[in-house]
Amino acid sequence: MASANSNANVYGGDEINAIILDPGSLSTRIGYAGDDFPKIITPSYYAANGKKHIFGDSINVPRADFDIKPILKDSVIEDWDAAIEQYHHYFDKELALDYKEQPIFITEPIWTSAKQRQTLVENIYEKFDFPALYLGRAPTCVSFQQGRPNCLVVNIGHDTVSVTAVIDGISLLKNSMRTHYSGQYLSDQLYDLFLNKFPSLTLDAKYKIRTKTPTKYPEPPVFTPRELPKNITKSFDDYQKELLFHEMKETLLEAPDKQITDENSESYSKDENRRAFELPNGQSIELAIERYEMADSLFEPNNYSFTNETLANKYSVENGSLTIDSNQDDYRPLKRARKNESNQSTPPPAATEPSVAETRGLTQLISHVLSTIDIDLRASVAHNIIVTGGASLIPQVTERLYSELSSLNPGLKIRLHAVGNSSERVNQAWIGASVLASLGTFHQMWVTKEEYDEAGPDKILNQRFR
């Protein structure tokens, strides 16, 4: 069998420039190991009319009869044909790769099933000519980006919120939780708000507007429409509205410093907390307490229900429990020596957890994962909580998290680490993979197709790709 050591001379040290592929639900990042930033950041969607597929920002050009379709859901590939075609588009046309000279490192979420992992590996070997590859867990990559081998990675992304313990640089699958109270959940909250608070409002996406005159709701919008092709599809219009919601979240939302209740709600309704947002058609709307309530729903989803039935049915009750479809034995960290001067250990987090049938918000999710971590490691992990993902950029989210986690866990010294640069924070997994794949000792981790064929998928997936 081809051993890892036999690949050292070919893929070792600075002699190679591995490709880093980081697929996400909202965007996919591609670049070279050792770089500080991905070369390509492209939407994880494509435009299709049954004959032709279009990738990249070109999907935002209105075309007749072109649907916008997602490639991934929950950061897991669902449309394999489109994914392979997208990767070929960027590998061949944009980067002009010489496959035989460069291995590929692919990030993956911890909940990827064994079947999905096997399908990914076999597609990469069959459809491309990479000499070797490696699958890396996204939380592990984030931990390397921060240089913290023992940490808790809190990823507040587009489709999901996930909390994963990383010990000695390895993601602990059994100490992980996930819910869907994340970025898309906030977009749906915005849409639900518009349906109720602004019933006469028309959400016109940017592509429809040629010129506009500023007005203020409830005054009707005054604009000149753009000439468009006929038969613009609903999926294209919906996708453009999602981009609008994304912009609104970045501009309007702010997390309150504590849970909003009847007693303190009046303070968030004051004029000083109002923010205006101009829609693409020139019409302005103002939000006050609503922009705090939507951000508060990340922490207290139980307190905010959808009035629209379709949106309400989209989100089931989630307490974060995660079933990992894998034969892999979870990593068992080495026992750390306890301090001799004390027989007392770090107390577990306060017992404020909901029942199985109830929801867990962001703080409860993190607190519960902390309580499941080995008592000898808990203090170290609590001191290294990494907050990442696009939705974590909402102002005051990390401050609210720190306040609530410190209150719930008085026996632990809580410390949050959130990168200040917004571009770096949303690309942390890619950057961590770039760091990891460029290490001089990483050459022994690459797996060739010959080794995969000889050892079999079970052994490679469960023992090599940790």
Image (cartoon, rainbow, N blue to C red):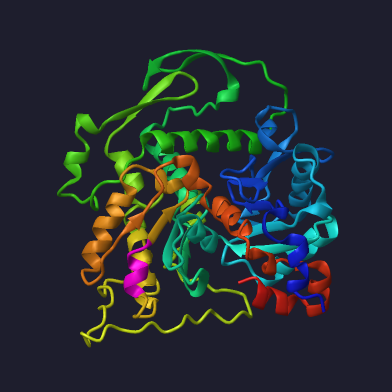
Q: Which residues are magenta?
A: 378-384
Instruction: State the residue at coordinates (60%, 53%).
Output: 434
Q: State which quarter of the image contains the C terminus.
A: bottom right
Of residues 382 and 173, which is closer to you in this image?
382
Total marks shown come to 0
Of residues 139 and 324, which is closer to you in this image?
139
Q: Is residue 389 above or below residue 440?
A: above
Residue 407, located in which quarter of the rendered image?
Answer: bottom left
Q: Main secondary structure of the magenta part?
A: helix
| Left or right: 306 in relation to 1 | left
Q: Is residue 391 above or below residue 247?
A: below
Q: State which quarter of the image contains the N terminus.
A: bottom right
| Left or right: 94 in relation to 152 | right
* Rendering coords of residue 125 (x, y %): 81, 61
Of residues 323 and 95, which is closer to you in this image?
95
* Rendering coords of residue 320 (x, y %): 44, 67
* Rendering coords of residue 310 (x, y %): 51, 50
Question: Was residue 382 drawn as part of the magenta stretch in this picture?
Answer: yes
* Rendering coords of residue 13 (x, y %): 67, 58
Question: Was residue 170 drawn as part of the magenta stretch in this picture?
Answer: no
Q: Is residue 308 visible?
A: no
Q: Is residue 290 above or below residue 385?
A: above
Instruction: State the residue at coordinates (50%, 56%).
Output: 160
Instruction: State the residue at coordinates (22%, 72%).
Output: 411
